[in-house]
């Protein structure tokens, strides 16, 4: 079996994708830990890490910029760090605000946008789509060049296109006819903006004291100065996703729906001609005694002195585990066939959730 480290050799960006609830976030953190321990300077961009896991890493206040995990903390768990592990939790709104700051041509434009009521509503809606802000943050970290490897834990999504098409959707927004009408209204649109709309806004101003027309005018005037920058950024993000040094790892569990989503996402990667680095099948049930007859197990336990009801209960548990293991094995074979992936990384189900360093290390060992 080929571990993740070999698959990521020479890669600078690793995007961990898959459906929600399959262990993507912990897999991303464990992967980053393994690469850092091996000598890389690694930053993992997480979406929503378990609070206990963040606390165990000494990063209770994860923010929108990477913070280093204390090597001494990891050393106390037997991990000798040859490199550096950094972590951050994505703040979509802060990322979008930072993007406005970076792209603003001057301080006045920046203040006109960030302090505008229309922007407050629009930015919250755009930032709510974590897909774009995730890749925007990834682009910034990559462009700054401070890390050997970046590991991105992608938002859970029912639609793989939400992530892969994020740059194109942003470009389409800025090139859309509706936005151009708002920026430079002409003809009927201009008459509507100058007559009926202005009457409505003047009434609202008298009732609320808020000059909404002025807010709209200031916002779109400032926005017109950012359009080229936004489109250039979207093009840069799209290029990064297709870069030969960027690869995608798909994480799934053996359950039916995550398996179907993994197959779907792999197909979209292929259509977009983006690199597929490998498949991780997490939380797999493995029957250690797959060939054992449950009835024979019960008999053996009774002969060893165990009470008959308890021996029967153990036998039923053995049978249930064998059934689950058989189901998971079938799912893995389907994934191998559909993804043309003969050597997926299979991670056996661990005891409990991965919520501390020891759990993270166990997952790292399985991955690496």
Image (cartoon, helix red, strand yellow):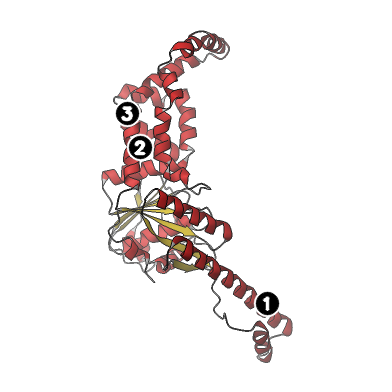
Separation of residues labelled 1 and 2 (CA atoms): 56 Å
Q: Which residue is mark 3?
A: 228
Mark 1 vs mark 2: give the one in front: 2
Mark 1 and mark 2 lie on one chain; the one further toward the N terminus is 2
User: In the displayed structure, would residue 212 be above or below residue 150?
Assistant: above
Separation of residues labelled 3 and 1 (CA atoms): 65 Å
Q: Cβ–Cβ below 8 Å for labels 1 and 2?
A: no
Q: Position of residue 108 (x, y in %)?
A: 33, 21
Q: Which residue is mark 1?
A: 316
Mark 3 and mark 1 lie on one chain; the one further toward the N terminus is 3
Q: Which residue is mark 2?
A: 234
Number of residues whose C-alpha sits closer than 10 Å to that of mark 2, classed few (under 14), some (14–19) or many (20 or more): many
Label 3 SS: helix
Mark 3 and mark 2 lie on one chain; the one further toward the N terminus is 3
User: In the displayed structure, would residue 98 be above or below residue 150?
Assistant: above
Q: Quadrant of the C terminus?
A: bottom left
Name of the residue lying farthest toward the right: 309
Instruction: Report the residue at 44% width, 19% height from top.
Output: 181
Residue 52 shows in this picture: no
Instruction: Report the residue at 39% width, 67% height from top.
Output: 77
Number of residues whose C-alpha sits closer than 10 Å to that of mark 3, classed few (under 14), some (14–19) or many (20 or more): some
Q: Quadrant of the N terminus?
A: bottom left
Label 2 SS: helix
Q: Position of residue 310 (x, y in %)?
A: 70, 80
Q: Is residue 333 left or right of residue 80?
A: right
Name of the residue lying farthest toward the bottom: 303
Instruction: Report the residue at 56% width, 11% height from top.
Output: 200
Separation of residues labelled 3 and 2 (CA atoms): 10 Å
Residue 179 shows in this picture: yes
- Using the image, tell me which numbered label, if any, was put on residue 76: none
Mark 3 vs mark 1: give the one in front: 3
| Viewer-side residue, 38 vs 155 | 155
């Amino acid at each position: 079996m080929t571990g993740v480290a070999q698959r990521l050799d020479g890669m600078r960006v690793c995007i961990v994708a898959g459906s929600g609830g399959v262990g993507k976030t912990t897999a991303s953190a464990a992967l980053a830990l393994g690469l850092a321990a091996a000598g890389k300077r690694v930053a993992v961009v997480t979406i929503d890490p378990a609070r206990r896991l963040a606390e165990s890493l000494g990063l209770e206040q994860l923010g929108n910029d990477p913070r280093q995990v204390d090597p001494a903390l990891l050393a106390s768990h037997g991990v000798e760090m040859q490199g550096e592990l950094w972590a951050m939790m994505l703040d979509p709104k802060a990322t979008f605000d930072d993007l406005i700051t970076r792209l603003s041509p001057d301080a006045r434009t920046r203040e006109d946008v960030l302090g505008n009521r229309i922007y407050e509503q629009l930015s919250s809606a755009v930032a709510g789509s974590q897909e774009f802000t995730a890749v925007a943050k990834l682009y910034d970290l990559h462009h700054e060049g401070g890390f050997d490897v970046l590991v991105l834990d992608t938002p859970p999504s029912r639609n793989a296109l939400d992530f892969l098409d994020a740059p194109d959707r942003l470009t389409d927004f800025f090139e859309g006819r509706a936005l151009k009408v708002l920026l430079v209204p002409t003809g009927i649109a201009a008459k509507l903006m100058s007559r009926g709309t202005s009457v409505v806004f003047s009434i609202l101003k008298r009732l609320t004291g808020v000059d909404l027309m002025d807010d709209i005018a200031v916002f779109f005037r400032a926005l017109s100065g950012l359009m080229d920058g936004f489109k250039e950024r979207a093009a840069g993000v799209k290029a990064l996703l297709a870069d030969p040094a960027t690869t995608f790892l798909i994480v799934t569990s053996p359950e039916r729906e995550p398996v179907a989503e993994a197959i779907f996402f792999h197909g979209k990667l292929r259509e977009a001609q983006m690199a597929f680095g490998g498949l991780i099948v997490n939380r797999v049930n493995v029957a250690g005694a797959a060939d054992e007859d449950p009835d024979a197990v019960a008999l053996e336990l009774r002969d060893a002195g165990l009470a008959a009801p308890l021996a029967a209960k153990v036998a039923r548990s053995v049978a249930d585990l064998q059934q689950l293991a058989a189901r998971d094995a079938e799912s893995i074979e389907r994934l191998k066939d559909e993804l043309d992936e003969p050597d997926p990384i299979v991670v056996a189900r661990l005891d409990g959730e991965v919520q501390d360093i020891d759990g993270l290390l166990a997952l790292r060992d399985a991955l690496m």
